[in-house]
Image (cartoon, helix red, strand yellow):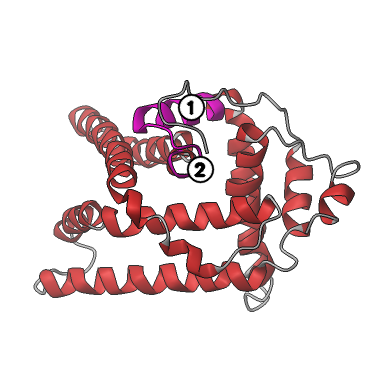
């Protein structure tokens, strides 16, 4: 970690090969699948409880109504302090695993001491998404263009991608909230189209792996998290180069 008063570190401008990242992600699933699925199960269980609670709070809501959508937006806002530290924990488990450290699914809970920083950062990203969505939908409604709704979802995903490293940068580098957001934005912008293509390919691979009874997802889901949140972070902020021909054999000896 670095002192939060220091100048935020610059990200590394390492170019990466998308196929190499995917292949490397698959390699690193060995020995990590059990930990990944335990964390995913914990997250899914907590999310299930939280959204069940939403139906308890709003018992008269009809499924798929506009009222439901608005209410769940409120619930998303309320549960940020619960979810933000857990998601940060998951990111850091992956990053530390790729650094060769021993990791446990229990580490998902260790970032609640900085809950206020993680919650505020998540809130800022959430508000940016909300404002852009509101503006886009308002323009679409004014011009009677329904496809603006799709644009709203796309822009929301882009915002999520731009600030995808904010929480781990706060936890790992002890950065201030705005510094972490800006560093994430700059790093993602430097590789924006490659990251988008990587994400699309990872989603396609995961969907295809679900076809034979979902068995393939045992490997592809952990691989997706490792590749997208772990390897990219290590490449951009630790300066690690992932070359499937030259580096992987060296890395395997460290695990």
- Which quadrant would residue 136 be assigned to in this image? top left
Question: Does residue 204 appear anywhere in the picture?
Answer: no
Nearer-N-terminus badge (1/2): 2
Q: Whole-Å distance between the Cαs marked 1 and 2?
A: 13 Å
Q: Secondary structure at mark 1?
A: helix
| Region of the chain picked out in magenta, as a range | 170-188
Q: Residue at x 35, y 28 (%)?
A: 178
188 or 158: nearer the eye? 188
Residue at image x 40%, y 59%?
A: 86
Q: Which residue is mark 1?
A: 183
* Residue depicted at 44% across the width and 72% down the height: 42
Q: Nearer the viewer, mark 1 or mark 2?
A: 2
* Numbered mark located on residue 131 in the image: none
**The disc label shown at residue 172, or none:** 2
From this view, report whether residue 193 is shown above or below residue 252. above
Question: Which one is in front, 220 or 174?
Answer: 174
Q: Is residue 45 magenta?
A: no
Does residue 176 appear anywhere in the picture?
Answer: yes
Q: Quadrant of residue 207?
A: bottom right
Image quarter hosting the C terminus: bottom right
């Amino acid at each position: 970690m670095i002192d939060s008063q220091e100048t935020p570190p610059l990200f590394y401008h390492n170019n990466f090969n998308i196929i190499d990242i995917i292949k490397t992600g698959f390699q690193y699933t060995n020995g990590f699948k059990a930990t990944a699925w335990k964390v995913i199960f914990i997250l899914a269980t907590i999310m299930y409880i939280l959204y069940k609670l939403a139906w308890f709070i709003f018992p008269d809501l009809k499924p798929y109504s506009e009222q439901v959508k608005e209410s769940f937006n409120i619930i998303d806002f309320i549960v940020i302090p619960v979810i933000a530290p857990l998601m940060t924990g998951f990111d850091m488990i992956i990053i530390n695993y790729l650094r060769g450290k021993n990791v446990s699914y229990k580490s998902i809970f260790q970032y609640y001491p900085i809950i206020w920083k993680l919650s505020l950062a998540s809130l800022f990203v959430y508000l940016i998404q909300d404002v852009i969505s509101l503006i886009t939908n308002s323009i679409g409604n004014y011009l009677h263009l329904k496809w603006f709704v799709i644009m709203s979802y796309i822009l929301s995903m882009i915002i999520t991608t731009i600030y995808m490293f904010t929480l781990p940068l706060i936890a790992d580098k002890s950065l201030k909230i705005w510094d972490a957001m800006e560093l994430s934005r700059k790093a993602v912008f430097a590789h924006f189209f490659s990251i988008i293509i990587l994400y699309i390919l990872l989603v396609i691979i995961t969907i295809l792996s679900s076809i034979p009874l979902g068995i393939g997802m045992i490997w592809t889901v952990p691989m997706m998290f490792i590749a997208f949140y772990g390897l990219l972070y290590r490449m951009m902020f630790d300066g690690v180069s992932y070359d499937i021909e030259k580096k992987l054999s060296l890395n395997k000896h460290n695990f």
